[in-house]
Amino acid sequence: MQLSDLNYNLPPELIAAEPLESRSASRLLIVNRVSTTISDRSFADLPGLLRPTDLVVLNNTRVFPARLLGRTATGGQVEIFLINRIKGNIWQTLAKPAKRLRPGSKILFAEGLSAVVEEKFDDGSVAVAFTSSVDFDSLIDRIGRTPLPPYIKRTADEPDLDRERYQTVYASNRGAIAAPTAGLHFTPEILTQVRDRGIDVAEITLHVGYGTFEPVRTKEIKDHRVAAERFEIDGTAAEKLERARRDSRRIVAVGTTTTRALEYVMDRDGGFVPSAGKADLTIKPGYRFRVVAAMLTNFHLPQSSLLVLVSTFAGYDLIMRAYSHAVEKRYRFYSYGDCMLIE
């Protein structure tokens, strides 16, 4: 597969710039890998579409406000996007405009937060050392902004809305710089309906990092690697996963990030025990899925590693047909858009 194979035509007006008033009002495209059929439903139908023996696995990572607006010593405005804590309060960041920043440059933010540029990396990112008179993470939670994806062509003019809405209702583990967007459709009521049908639910954590949405820069997909991301599977989740695996029950992953974490652990350990670390797995054509039997996922950008993942899971031709159908039927795309269940 080549990068050029992962294109599709998407009218700009189908990119969802705003969330729906109700999370569960989104549409749901059902993609059946066995019959290769595609059907249109509503996300509110999901509890009735799941099997009573399913194990539904959620990613409970919580997005923190990783965008910071500051000024240089000369008064120039700078935006800093925190993407990876190197150590302590030294972070790998994306800076805009990066050309204003050189090693030694000082940046001033709100509430006395300051930073000094330490290093500029070959990939364009910048190492920044922060100084704060109070707890750094608490301060970031106050002054930071929600890291909306760049294809949402609006400012975060309703920061309170985005802080709540660009977050799953079950988010509990702070550490992601982007939301696991397949989970944004769930409401407490939908989760209650799922459990009331006797369907088991497990929560794991994979902190969504820059690797999830970093552009694919290789012409051949086989040459691309997704950066490792931190994950954790606690004892309760490990027990549920291992029991479902041994009983040959269907494991339904909510999102590509959940899928990646589960498959990484299975590849590494051959089973599930409490574990934590960095999920270093790139799912691309030729990969054999060992855990996930069904996946709930949003619609992904052309030429993205996430589109590679779902194409590998469902088959390239079927996914391209599903995306074409979604465009024709005017589905809403990307983070705040509609979703599909691949089974």
Image (cartoon, rainbow, N blue to C red):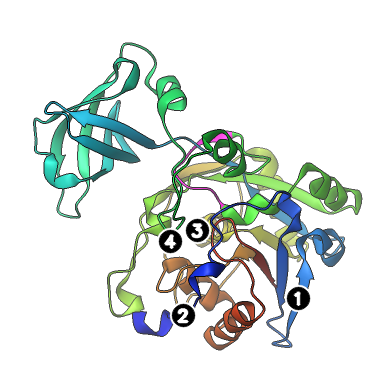
- x, y (%) of residue 179? 53, 48
Q: Which residues are magenta?
A: 173-180
Going by the numbered disc 2, the residue's amino acid type is Gly
* Marked residue nearer the N-terminal end (2 or 4): 4
- Helix, strand or loop at label 4? It is loop
- x, y (%) of residue 201? 75, 49
* Marked residue nearer the N-terminal end (1 or 3): 1
- Helix, strand or loop at label 2? It is loop
Is there CB contact under 8 Å for labels 3 and 4?
yes
In the picture, measured across the screen, residue 80 lies left or right of residue 203, that is left
Q: Residue at x 47, y 55 (%)?
A: 152
Going by the numbered disc 1, the residue's amino acid type is Asp
Dot 2: few (<14), some (14–19), or many (≥20) neighbours within 10 Å? Answer: few
Q: Nearer the viewer, mark 1 or mark 3?
A: 1
Is residue 65 positioned above or below 229 on the image?
A: above
In the image, 59 versus 154, the foreground residue is: 154
Going by the numbered disc 3, the residue's amino acid type is Tyr
- Residue 260 on the magenta segment: no
- x, y (%) of residue 118? 14, 34
Going by the numbered disc 4, the residue's amino acid type is Leu
Q: Which residue is mark 3?
A: 264
Q: Which residue is mark 4?
A: 281
Q: Which residue is mark 1?
A: 40
Is there CB contact under 8 Å for labels 2 and 4?
no
